[in-house]
Amino acid sequence: MKIVSAVYLLGMWVYGLCVRLASLFNEKARLLCAGRSETWRKLSGFNNQGGTIWVHAASLGEFEQGRPLIEAIKKKHPDQKVVLSFYSPSGYEVRKNYAMADLVCYLPADGPANAKRFIDAINPTAVYFVKYEFWHFFLKEVKKRGIPLYGISMIFRKQQPFFSTWGDWFRNMLTFFTHIYVQDKVSAELLKGIGVENCSVVGDTRFDRVRQIADSAKEVDSVKAFVSGAHQVIVAGSTWPPDEDILLSFINRQDVDAKLVIAPHEIDKQRVDSLCAKLRVPYVRFTDAQGADLASAKVFVVNTIGILSSIYRYGSVTYVGGGFGVGIHNTLEPAIYGLPVIFGPNHLKFKEAVDLIDCGGGFSIASGEDFEKIISRFFTDPDALHAAGKAAGDYCRSMLGATRAIMDDTVK
């Protein structure tokens, strides 16, 4: 164990050196280096008297899983201090001003000295690590001090090192947790198969989060006006070029009686200009919608951030991008509205996408022909469209409650 820990620590040092070198030409690496240095300055002025609740998330997606818990804690104990840490710039830079946390920072590089210094500074009375985060020396230091340590919305696969013949060091990290709250029975069975009994199946807190988002969704007047009177509407979110090739090939056809609202994952001008150049039908951009002829436009391009979760509800059917790349984006945001969700083939690591397919509310495609076949069915068979949407909505509603279960167990 000691040898593996030493090798791991050396790996962390080498990784840190690589990040510093990469920061000379890579923006994310530069943000990470600067942010970790800023963490120590922030902590030097932080008042940790009375203790804090520490929640750690890798990035933005994991933050959304931790967020319902943070807000439930603050609702129950308004004076409770909360420290929120991130590993990734894509999480920290978006949520560094999150109002419900008393301190938002980068997690320093994993190591015994940094772990001791960080935990001394924030003085946590309870710690929550979200989903996939396992930083050996931080977890070990929390355990050493007898601070309750919880894993939330965690999900495990047999291929992970915890379950391999050579995974003793990784398995040992699981013993640092007071309790692990997992998303599904498979994860619990895997853990119990290696002797980890302190686990419970409570589901994924993201369902509680998307319910909150849907309940607080605001009207987006320009999108609402665009879809008004349309026979069928496809709302596509977080799309990449391979997704758009399929969607635009379909909507560019003159015989298609439908409208498309499309929100690309990246919205810089060059990216949006490239998307619009592929359109052969009238379109309007969100930033140009004021005074535009929305009735005659066939495509609405959302070139802004912050409204995607609110505009899914204007669709008859939805599409979530990323499935022709590294992996699909958030399928729950449209599903919570009771809408069918279509996505690309790279979805197998996303339990909710697999579940949506199994229940009849989600549909995976591998080509434009697959997409047109599904859309044609929905647009010609209202009963099929209704049944798929109902299945998606029912599934989401059936999965609510993970936050309350964790709160009942861990927050008095």
Image (spheres, rainbow, N blue to C red):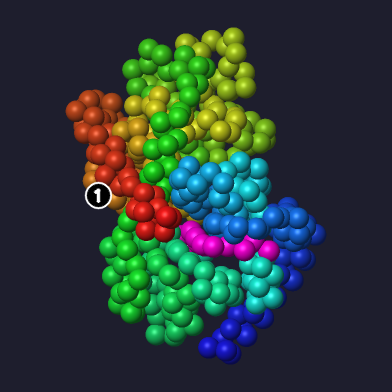
Residue 170 position in % (x across, y down): 47, 78
Instruction: Report whether 384 appears left or right of 183.
Output: left
Instruction: Report whether 78 appears left or right of 16.
Output: left
- What count of labels does the image hold? 1
Rendered view: 81 above or below 162: above
The residue located at (30%, 47%) in the rendering is 399
Question: Residues in magenta?
Answer: 121-132
Amino acid bearing label 1: Asp
Rendered view: 314 above or below 169: above
The residue located at (58%, 23%) in the rendering is 285
Camera-nearest residue between 353 and 111: 111
Camera-nearest residue between 199 and 52: 52
Q: Secondary structure at mark 1?
A: helix
Residue linked to disc 1: 358
Residue 349 position in % (x across, y down): 40, 58
The residue located at (33%, 17%) in the rendering is 231
Locate the C terminus and report the quarter of the image it occupies.
bottom left
The residue located at (52%, 30%) in the rendering is 307
Residue 222 position in % (x across, y down): 52, 17
